[in-house]
Image (spheres, rainbow, N blue to C red):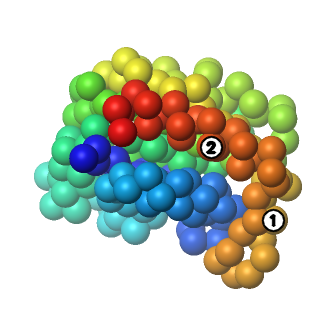
């Protein structure tokens, strides 16, 4: 059975990004794909800020990624790039930490003006970490994710379709 690591680069639980996360986790669960979640904001802030490569928490999360066949990376866009908290975490991965992994970036931003942030900001870093099979990412505008309760979200049909397609391609490459 394929094992997937989920890296969530949102700064908190209130982010609309969590609408994409919940929907995607539901797709994985329905496909009986095993996954483990890394919420970067829950890692020790000092370990992230001071690049503590000896941190037990960081080493445990790196082990989750090492054991995974695939990696889903969720991030909001700020200032035309992925979140700073995600960047600090990616900096703590081993140099080839994504080698032999299928990677799918899933991003939410405020406007179409940041549509290319996946291609020009995130994918080069993923490639530098050894990822050779990066599935075409999904960029979503935050107004396409409606908050219906404090931690529940409704996605527009078009977003659900794009997520279904991308996660389907991700699963095909994982051979599940």
Q: Secondary structure at mark 1?
A: strand
The answer to whether residue 27 is left or right of residue 98 is right
> Going 58% across and 26% down the picture, which residue do you hit?
136
Quadrant location of residue 126?
top left
Image quadrant holding the C terminus, namely top left
The answer to whether residue 105 is seen in the rendering is: no
Residue behind mark 2: 164
Quadrant location of residue 65?
top left
* Residue 107 screen position, x and y as percent: 63, 43
Residue toward you, 122 or 103: 103
* Residue 67 screen position, x and y as percent: 19, 44
Classify 53 as above or below 45.
above
Other residues around mark 1 within 10 Å, as few (<14) / some (14–19) / many (≥20)? some
Q: Secondary structure at mark 2?
A: helix
* Residue 66 screen position, x and y as percent: 20, 41
* Distance in Å between CA atoms under marks 2 and 1: 18 Å
Classify 141 as above or below 34.
above
Q: Who comes first in sequence, dot 2 or dot 1?
A: 1
> Going 74% across and 81% down the picture, which residue do you hit?
149
* Residue 158 screen position, x and y as percent: 80, 44
Other residues around mark 2 within 10 Å, as few (<14) / some (14–19) / many (≥20)? some
Residue behind mark 1: 146
> Going 57% across and 48% down the picture, which residue do you hit?
75
The answer to whether residue 144 is left or right of residue 58 is right
Classify 120 as above or below 84.
above
């Amino acid at each position: 059975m394929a094992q997937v690591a989920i890296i969530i680069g949102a700064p908190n639980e209130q982010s609309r990004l969590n609408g994409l996360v919940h929907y995607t986790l539901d797709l994985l669960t329905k496909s009986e794909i095993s996954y483990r979640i890394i919420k970067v904001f829950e890692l020790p802030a000092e370990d992230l800020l001071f690049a503590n490569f000896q941190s037990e928490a960081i080493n445990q999360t790196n082990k989750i990624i090492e054991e995974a066949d695939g990696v889903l990376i969720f991030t909001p866009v700020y200032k035309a790039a992925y979140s700073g908290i995600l960047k600090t975490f990616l900096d703590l991965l081993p140099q080839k930490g994504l080698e032999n992994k299928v990677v799918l970036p899933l991003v939410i931003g405020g406007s179409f003006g940041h549509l290319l942030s996946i291609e020009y900001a995130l994918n080069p870093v993923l490639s530098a970490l050894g990822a050779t099979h990066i599935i075409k990412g999904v960029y979503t505008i935050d107004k396409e994710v409606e908050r219906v309760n404090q931690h529940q979200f409704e996605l527009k049909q078009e977003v659900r379709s794009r997520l279904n397609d991308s996660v389907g391609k991700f699963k095909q490459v994982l051979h599940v």
